[in-house]
Image: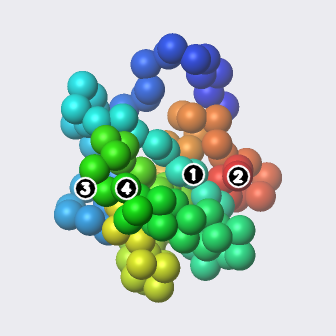
Amino acid sequence: MADLKVGDMAPDFTLPSTVGDKVTLSDYRGKKNVVLLFYPAAFSGVCSTENRQCAELTSANPAGGVEILGISVDNLWSQRAFGEKLGVGYPLLADFHPKGDVAEKYGAWQEKSNYGRT
């Protein structure tokens, strides 16, 4: 589990994305603020609500200078279907191989339950 502190450099990663091919966090450095939205599983109740609310916020303020990156251990196919159902325009990233590797870097992985923390 990561021991990140305020002010630490965010660990870089590249993950398959529902928008384009892949997303690399460091590509945003110096260009845009990024919110990493870790959620346990696509199509679950709480995760659907959180992503729907973030989608509404970004559509209400598209030029806000903030990029949301949704991350779960679901595969890319599930992420695409989930994003389409909710009308999510921001990238949903598949942290599934190895399962939860990026979530682990950020301390957002619950090993015993095999899904990310909320």
Q: Residue furthest right?
A: 112
Mark 1 vs mark 2: which is more N-terminal? 1
Rendered image quadrant of residue 14: top left
x and y percentages locating residue 98 in the rendered image: 48, 52
Q: In 3D space, how far apart are the residues under numbered discs 4 and 2 (Cα atoms)?
A: 24 Å
Report the quarter where the N terminus lies: top right
CB-based contact (under 8 Å), mark 1 and mark 3: no
Query: How are the colours assigned in the image?
Result: rainbow
Give the amino acid type for the residue marked by disc 2 in the picture: Thr
CB-based contact (under 8 Å), mark 2 and mark 3: no
Residue assigned mark 3:
22
Q: Is residue 30 left or right of residue 101?
A: left
Rendered image quadrant of residue 97: bottom left
User: Could you say which is closer to the camera, residue 96 or residue 118?
Assistant: 118
Mark 1 vs mark 4: which is more N-terminal? 1
CB-based contact (under 8 Å), mark 1 and mark 2: yes
x and y percentages locating residue 50 in the rendered image: 62, 63
Residue assigned mark 4:
61
Q: In 3D space, how far apart are the residues under numbered discs 4 and 3 (Cα atoms)?
A: 24 Å
Give the amino acid type for the residue marked by disc 4 in the picture: Asn
Residue depicted at 61% across the width and 17% down the height: 5
Residue assigned mark 1:
38
Mark 4 vs mark 3: which is more N-terminal? 3
Q: In 3D space, how far apart are the residues under numbered discs 1 and 2 (Cα atoms)?
A: 7 Å
Residue depicted at 59% across the width and 39% down the height: 104
Residue assigned mark 2:
118
Mark 1 vs mark 3: which is more N-terminal? 3
User: Could you say which is closer to the camera, residue 19 or residue 101?
Assistant: 19
Say if 52 sits above or below 57 in the image: below
Task: Give the structural element (helix, strand or loop) at label 1.
Answer: strand
